[in-house]
Structures are given as C-alpha cells and as structure tokens.
Image: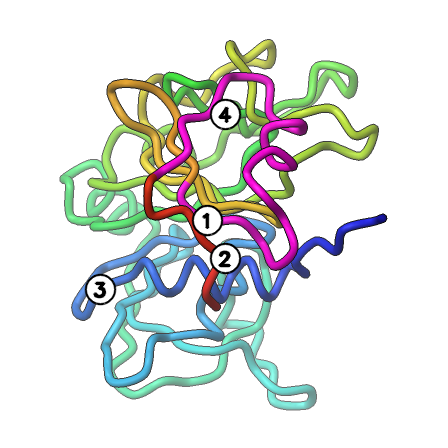
Amino acid sequence: MVKLRLEREAIAMRVARELRDGDVVNLGIGIPTLCSQFVPEGQTVLYHSESGVLGYGPMAELGQEDIDLINAGGQFLAPHPGMSFFSSADAFAMIRGGHIDVAVLGAFQVSEQGDMANWMLPQRGVGNVGGAMDLAVGARRIIVAMDHTDRSGAPKIVRECSFPLTGTGCVDTIVTDIAVIEVSDEGLVLTEGAPGWEAADVQALTEPTLTVSLDFGEMQL
C-alpha cells in the first residue's frame, strides 16, 4: 500500500506550529518561503529576509504584485502593517549579530549530528551558499523543512553528509513530508509521523537509527 506524503504547504503549516509569539524568523528558499502563509492564530511572527525586509506577511495575490516587495525566493509579498525596509547589509548584520530567533531552511542532506548541506549538489557542480551559512551560525534555532528522500528515493537524513556542508551541528528540528524529528545530543528523536506513517515506515527511509519518542504520534497540522 502506497502511503501518502504531505504536500509542501502542509510541511510549511507544520513548521509554523513551531514558531512562538514575537519570534523573528528568516525563511529560506523553497518550502520555507510558504511558512509566511501560516502565522499561528493570535501570534505575531516577524518574518525577516536578506533582501532587506522585516515583518512581512503572506504572498501577494495575483495582480497585486509589487516588484519592490519580495522574499528570499523572489516571490512577491503583500503589504503588511508594520513592515520595515533596510539595506541588505543591515539584514545580514541582524543575522550575524544573533538577532534571528529561528531560521527555516531547506536542505539536500542533514546528518544525525545536525550537520546541514543545502547549497550545492555535487552532480550539478554549481551552487551558491547565499545567506544560509550566516544563518547556520547566527540564528538561535534552525528548522529544516524538506522532503524526506530525494527524487531517486535515497534518504536525505544520513549518518554523515556527503555533500559540501553549510554548517556543522546547527540543525535543531527536521520537518519532512513524512515526519518530525528532533536533533539531540543522543541522536535523532522521531516525535511525529504523517497520517498513516508508523515509526518503522519512517525508519525504513532514514539512514541513521532513530530513537522513537515515548510521545510519538500523528503529525498535527
């Protein structure tokens, strides 16, 4: 029986549940950019971008695009009360100064030690680390949002990263299309599975051995 995996929007929705009122959050390219669509009800999350904007909200509706309002992925943003604008240099100063509470990033690989590789696929031979390396060091918490396996079905959560690293020991939480996994000093702890996915199903697609939390249950969106 083929088990259904979460859509990209559902991964972003689950990541948004990790955010806390007042957090300053940087969203990387790909699935992470979707998180601004799902601010937890009753909470204020200040989304930050290296492009020089703080406090943005959802993406712009079709026909309402403004070429001066974009996120890290170049997607258009809707105007939002309280938005502020500044230079890219100031945006990076916020990251390097430790003022980002959470960074949500995509990844090609995450190791069982929390190492992250997200800027170059060796088979392509090209890549651009952008602000990811700064975030890996400067953000207080790193959440990786990604598919659990690559297009060939190989695990993206591995014992050791074989791709060029973005940062070492920097990842705190991994949210994929089939699971939520916490990175601890003792290794990887499986806390949630997507609907219909048991712990053994997730383990079968994960290279390192997972410790199953006593509170393991179905992913809540």
User: Which residue is located at x 52 percent, y 23 percent?
Assistant: 117
Residue position marked by numbered label 1 in the rendering: 192
Residues at marks 1 and 3 touching, judged by CB atoms closer than 8 Å: no
Residue at disc 1, secondary structure: strand
Q: Position of residue 107 (x, y in %)?
A: 55, 34
Q: Nearer the viewer, mark 2 or mark 3?
A: 2
Residue at disc 2, secondary structure: strand
Q: How many marks?
A: 4
Q: Is residue 101 left or right of residue 207?
A: left
Q: Which residues are magenta?
A: 191-213
Residue position marked by numbered label 3 in the rendering: 20
User: Which residue is located at x 40 percent, y 44 percent?
Assistant: 191
Q: Earlier in the sequence, mark 1 or mark 4?
A: 4
Q: Position of residue 123 (x, y in %)?
A: 78, 16
Residue position marked by numbered label 2 in the rendering: 218
Q: Position of residue 109 (x, y in %)?
A: 57, 25
Snapshot colouring: rainbow
Q: Name the amino acid type tagged 3.
A: Arg
Q: Badge 4, how many Cα within 10 Å: few under 14, some, many 20+?
A: many
Q: Badge 2, how many Cα within 10 Å: few under 14, some, many 20+?
A: some
Residue at disc 3, secondary structure: loop
Determine whether 13 is above or below 64 in the image: above
- Where is residue 131, by image quadrant? top left
**Mark 1 and mark 3: Cα distance apart in space:** 19 Å
Q: Earlier in the sequence, mark 2 or mark 4?
A: 4
Residue position marked by numbered label 4 in the rendering: 110
Disc number placed over residue 90 in the picture, else none: none
